[in-house]
Amino acid sequence: MTDRKNSDKKPDSQIIVIFGGRGDLSMRKIVPALFTLWTQGLMPARFAVLATGRSSIDNETYRAEVSSAISSVTKQKNSDLTGEFIRSFYYTALDPADIGDYKPLAMLLEQMREELGIPGNTLFYLSVPPGLYDDIPHNLALCGLNSESDGWKRMIIEKPFGHDYQSAVSLNKLLLENWNESQIYRIDHYLGKETVQNILVTRFSNGIFEPLWNRNYVHHVEITSSESLGVEKRGSYYEETGALRDMVQNHLLHLVGFIAMEPPSSIDSTSIRNELVKVFESLRPISQEDAAKVTIRGQYTGSHVKGELISGYREEEGVDPASMTETFAAMKFYIDNWRWGGVPFYVRTGKRLPTRVTEAVIHFKPTPHYLFSGKSGCEGCNQLIIRIQPDEGILLKFGMKIPGAGFNVRNVNMDFHYSDLADGRIPEAYERLIYDCMNGDSTLYTRSDAVLAAWKFLDPVIQAWKNDHSIPVYGYPAGTWGPETADDLIEEPELTWRYPCKNLADDGIYCEL
Ligand code: BG6
């Protein structure tokens, strides 16, 4: 992993072309990330951003939109800085599916390069609906915009990459007809999160964890990513996706990969990505028949949360009133290798749960013989909780003697919060990822074999959920932790999922409730 402090380098001069330049992702994430990089001196010496979209607006109108996007995200009000930054933005109307629009794009890029003194290096950012992931790369190539004769060409593709294993194979094949793997940057913004990268640093820079990080000492691993928001304005996208494709196939499996991978031989892109793929390829296949036993799906229903009436998923805009799409997914699986043989991994994610929290919990085995009273089995076992967000940090739970007579034990916390660091600003995932792509570092981007292996693992579940109507879609009231039956996935009757925020004093975690 590159250490930003030690490796801050200015990327090559380049033009960044954003397809979907007026879209939500561009305005909420991409543009503010570029602005922050620029204020930190991490943008190229010479650069321009050319945004494209279907509507016809001029550069000045677009710049005004960029300026207000920056003010609303960074709270920077029309400052001189923003004024200077937006002068690097340009806009051109383009229908991504119409090949006729690409010749003018190529000519415009040529003209901008000449006028601004920027070489042919170009980063194409596809911030568009997945239906356009085949058209745009193909049309760019037909106009020679993939050619590296005058400078590098890179392409960032947002998730979801494919809809299932077969569609991901086809999309990959299509891309590789005109682009090299090294030009394709498949984004999973979780890999850009500091705390996700910190999993590797925690594991591989501390001698104390690695000896315990295996089947001999770990009882089970639990990963939760919960959101308090619903599907907002993305109902029609979500109808086609659901929680399994939206969160598990990418973000949560990547967390599993970082927690479970073997130490890479070095911290370069190939070594890390090789280890990640090995984890995905070792996931024990789940048959369609077993899907009913090891997975749970749910959908939020209307309810009152903090006195406010929250609509159910089926009442959301763009959602079929009889929809079977899951807004909650939980599953149990195994990684069949020497390190993890027999250790269950549990993952769950959902919308409209009580709070927004993403965390990974390593549950350690109990001591072989317990000397003190008041504890049995894994109750009160050591836990290492890696808080990905929002209260980023690491918490270790262990037993301590309660002062006084006897040997009474109580679980206490050793807690580290990123916010305690003097310069505790945690960069946004998109800042890191865009910076890396501008520099040609693909370490935190997903390689095709990893994407395919993740789809291959989940495909039988997707098929079972689609075809087997005996697998229930449990309703759960908005503001609760999903279907109660999700607890049954956890093998031992006395164990449940960890419910962050249930016991505030114990958790020391930021909670919305
Ligand atoms: C996106 C999903 O990839 O991740 C969204 O499409 C989800 O549905 C989001 O809300 C969660 O990201 P974060 O960074 O807020 O955890």
Image (cartoon, rainbow, N blue to C red):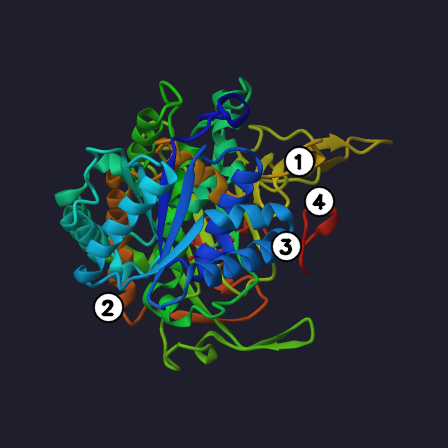
Task: Give me the disc on residue 506.
Answer: none
Which quadrant of the view contains residue 468? Answer: bottom left
Nearer to us: label 1 or label 2: 1
Q: Is mark 1 within 8 Å of ligand 1?
A: no
Q: CA–CA distance between discs 4 and 1?
A: 18 Å
Do labels 1 and 2 touch, CB within 8 Å?
no
Do labels 4 and 1 touch, CB within 8 Å?
no
Task: Residue under label 4, please give it.
Answer: 508
Task: Residue under label 1, please give it.
Answer: 424
Q: Amino acid under label 3?
A: Asn
Task: Residue under label 2, please give it.
Answer: 467
Q: Nearer the viewer, residue 447 or 293?
A: 447
Nearer to us: label 2 or label 3: 3
Q: Amino acid under label 4?
A: Gly
Q: Could you tell me which quadrant the N terminus lies in? A: top left
Q: Nearer the viewer, residue 160 or 217?
A: 160
Q: CA–CA distance between discs 1 and 3?
A: 26 Å
Sequence-first disc among 1 and 2: 1
Dot 3 alpha-carbon crowd within 10 angstroms: few under 14, some 14 to 19, many 20 or more: few
